[in-house]
Amino acid sequence: MIDFEKYKEFVQEVTSDESNEPHLMSARMSEIENEYGINPSLLLTAAIGLSSESGEFIEIVKKAVFQGKPLDKDVQFHLKRELGDIMWYVANACRTLDLTLDDIISENVNKLKARYPGGEFDVYYSENRKQGDL
């Protein structure tokens, strides 16, 4: 049997100081803003929002694929609205990182061209990436 209290102690030990201590997180956020000129509050808003809104989008798709829910026009409209919410958070990420959608799409095209040198999806290259291919 697992001793959950010991596990919680272990988790605390392997958690960063900035996660455990609000004043250290606040100091780190100030460092990020001062050193990189990035608004960490906006960056966190974008990151957390992207995760949560993507989860809502995924939930709708999961129910359609695995639970037999319809993918009718109303559900497609709901998906469209969730994508809009995702884009709102993408725009916030772009604001804080001083990026445009063109910057993001261009970099994505460059990454995928390098990953798939034949110009088409290939499982081998998908699973066996070159060093530095994020």
Image (spheres, rainbow, N blue to C red):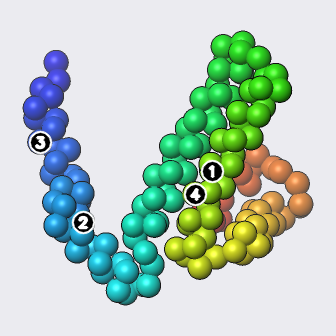
- Mark 3 neighbour class, 10 Å CA radius: few under 14, some 14 to 19, many 20 or more: few
Percent coordinates x, y for residue 117 in the rendering: 84, 64
Q: Which residue is mark 1?
A: 86
> Which type of secondary structure does the marked residue at label 4 adopt?
helix
Q: Which residue is mark 2?
A: 25
Cα–Cα gap, marks 2 and 3: 20 Å
Q: Earlier in the sequence, mark 3 or mark 4?
A: 3
Task: Give the quarter of the image for residue 106.
Answer: bottom right
Cα–Cα gap, marks 3 and 4: 35 Å
Q: Quadrant of the C terminus?
A: bottom right
Q: Earlier in the sequence, mark 2 or mark 3?
A: 3
State which mark lies toward you, 2 or 3: 2
Q: Which residue is mark 3?
A: 9
Task: Give the quarter of the image for residue 81.
Answer: top right
Q: Amino acid at mark 1?
A: Ile
Q: Which residue is mark 4?
A: 89
Percent coordinates x, y for residue 30 in the rendering: 29, 78
State which mark lies toward you, 1 or 2: 1
- Mark 2 neighbour class, 10 Å CA radius: few under 14, some 14 to 19, many 20 or more: some
